[in-house]
Image (cartoon, coloured by chain):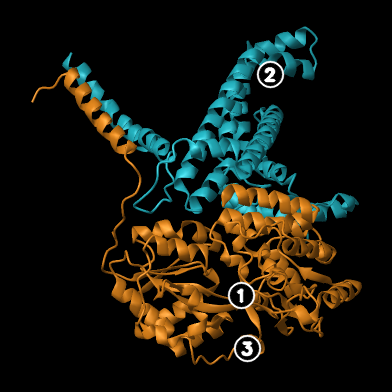
Amino acid sequence: MPYSRRHLLQLAAGSGAAAFLAACAGPGGSSSSTSNSDGPISFAHWRAEDKEVFEQIIKTSGSAVRQDISPSNDYQSTALQKLRGGTVGDAFTAFRGAQFLEIAKAGVWTDLTGKPLVAKYEPNLITAGAQDGKQLGLPYQLVFNTPLVNRDLVTETPKDWDSFLALLETLKGKGVTPIAWPGGDAANAGQLLNVMVVNNAPADDALGKIETGETKVTDDWFLTVLKQYQQLTPYFQKGSTGTSSDAALALFAQGKAGLLATGSFQVSGVRKLGATFPIDLLAPITTTADKAKYEGVFNATFILGVNAKSSKKDAAQAWLDKLSDPAVAGVYANGTAQHVTVKGVEYTNADLKALAPWLTKKTALAPRFQFSNLDVRGAVENAAVAVVGGKSPEEAAEAAQKVVDQKK
Amino acid sequence: MRSSRTLYLFAAPALVLYGGFFLLPAVQGLRYATTDWDGYSSTFHDVGAANLTDVVTDDDLFRHALTNNLKFLLVVVLGQTALALLLAVLLAARSRGSTWLRALFFLPTILSSVSVAFIWKFVYDPNFGLANALLRAVGLGRFESSYLGNESTAILWVAVAQIWFHAGQMMVVYIAGINQIPDELYDAARTDGAGRWQQFRHVTWPMVAPATALVVAYTTLQSFKAFDLILGLAGNPPRSGLDVLATRIYSTFANSQLGYAAAESIVFMVAIALVTFLQNRAARMVHG
């Protein structure tokens, strides 16, 4: 068929107009799975340090599983978009709090309520994976977001704030950095806030209520938290606000720091750097002994789930069944030095055995994961970093509250 | 006549790609900016210009990111252009030594941003890092810093890393420009008694004006697009002292606020257009 310039222009104009109108259409719509139903399932998570142990489990169990691993903060940022596509994460994991809720809102969790595997978990440790009475995910790891302590350097366990400061002063006097704190690492700088908040907060959910406006960063209890950060400042390593997680870990592993202000999830990292000293947990008790409600903080996270958008849901659930088996969970726990929420697991790892008493201590669920808005969480956590950097607690609190008011 | 019509078809692939990957997303971005869409729900609300108004008037995080980006831009454009020109002037001569040195200074350009971030993270570490170790070694320990941990100066240290990363690339552009300058101009200048500085001032500098315009424009865009280097150095999400517009938009997107992120992107586009316009005006004033 012959064509003219006019025809071409009409065709281009028509296509352009259609495309323009399509672009102007409202957002939304749903994604569906595009993954091939053959081949291994994708298991999406953020723990590169667990890769070898998972490979071992995959190999011994004969499961067809491919690990898709992203760094933790990238996973926090982008996992939902990838999961919605269905090409990544037939089985997946999520952080407690904001990410769990967003994935639930997007309808990506498969409801596991009533499935036999749920009964294999300690019921009180998997509430972070439930919503509206449905068990959407299964928190797998039980970690303590409580500072690690080198028991060769620190033998006592202070029971109140004053004796904690006295301990730090003693350590400093010995030429040891009292606390290694990764203030330059966005993900780990905020771990310390957990233990600084739990005994100061007027209620267990007070930190999360900052987001709804029911509590404020400028409230007295949070100002107390910030003032205590100010008191801790001389006991952190030099340049603490610019210290990466790896550097803080190295300071602790080399025996140059008494405490590492992160959590039990870094025990295996410390051991990999060659540390042989006994490791325990030690939370600063931020009040007087009689007012302290908690001895530390724990978190049930690494929430396992089956992707509702996947075409391999059965295989994905079979993988979760496998991980929920106490023997397999034991391989994971002992191989990664993490406690798990699965019932009947035998811990053989020396560090896990040493930290086992913490399973029955009075610990609070980590409050920093109560936030669902990451900008609000960032503002609150950065207030503490700003105080360590030299800002007054009042100034830092006001700046953070302003951001909270803008973003909530 | 027929063949001239056929020629239109040759432009079609480029037009389709441009339309599909630039124009349509841009139009879609405008539409999304007027909604509160979270990026995955099937429902949303129209919010009119509220997102844009909030971005411009009521968002401290965005304002910090914009300020950081402008500081970063200024330092990188001035520092990178000056360093690239200096290296080019020193290494323009065709000798074996200068060829090796050009290759050496160009080397960082071929590294990935993640590698560069890894290198500079080590340099800036307050306890184990090279920068503080050097200061201590030369008796200047009192100037030790926490570098990326210092809220007010952190972005400037990232700018230093960016200059190291790309100065070699811009040096090559300048060397090409310098090699185009006829030797007769230098001969004439020397005959008139011009020293090395005067030769540079009155011959080299005016003659590399087109290269300078190119370097400045390219560096400006690079500065606005510095994303992976900042995430690599600062972590994700970066603290407000290290946040720039690209990382702020990414954080908003990751916070499931796609409509608001689209509004931030529009302001970002306007900011780039404005800076580019001002640069062009300034370049015309300087070079006539």
Rate crowding at label 1 as few (under 14), some (14 to 19) or many (20 or more) other CA atoms within 10 Å. Answer: some
Which quarter of the figure has residue B159?
top right
Give the SS element for disc 3. Answer: helix
Q: Which mark is residue B205?
A: 2
Q: Nearer the viewer, mark 2 or mark 3?
A: 3
Give the alpha-carbon distance from disc 1 to disc 2, as whole Å.
58 Å
Label 2, label 3: how far apart the Cα atoms are = 74 Å
Q: Is residue A378 above or below residue B266?
A: below
Q: Residues within 10 Å of mark 2 (few under 14, many from 20)?
A: some
Whole-percent x, y for residue B31 in the image: 39, 37
Give the residue at x 88% y 75%: A166
Q: Which residue is mark 3?
A: A360
The kind of residue tagged 1 is: Phe
In which chain is the residue bearing label 2? B
Above/below status of A184 relative to A14: below
Residue B47 in the image, given as x and y percentages of width and height: 44, 40
User: Which residue is at a point 49% across and 86% down the rendered structure image?
Assistant: A122
Which disc number belongs to residue B250?
Answer: none
Residue under the image location 36 percent in, 63 percent down: A107
Q: Can you tell which chain is drawn orange?
A: A
**Tag 2 and tag 3 share a subunit:** no
Q: Residue A265: which disc?
A: 1
Q: Residue furthest front?
A: A214
Q: Earlier in the sequence, mark 3 or mark 1?
A: 1
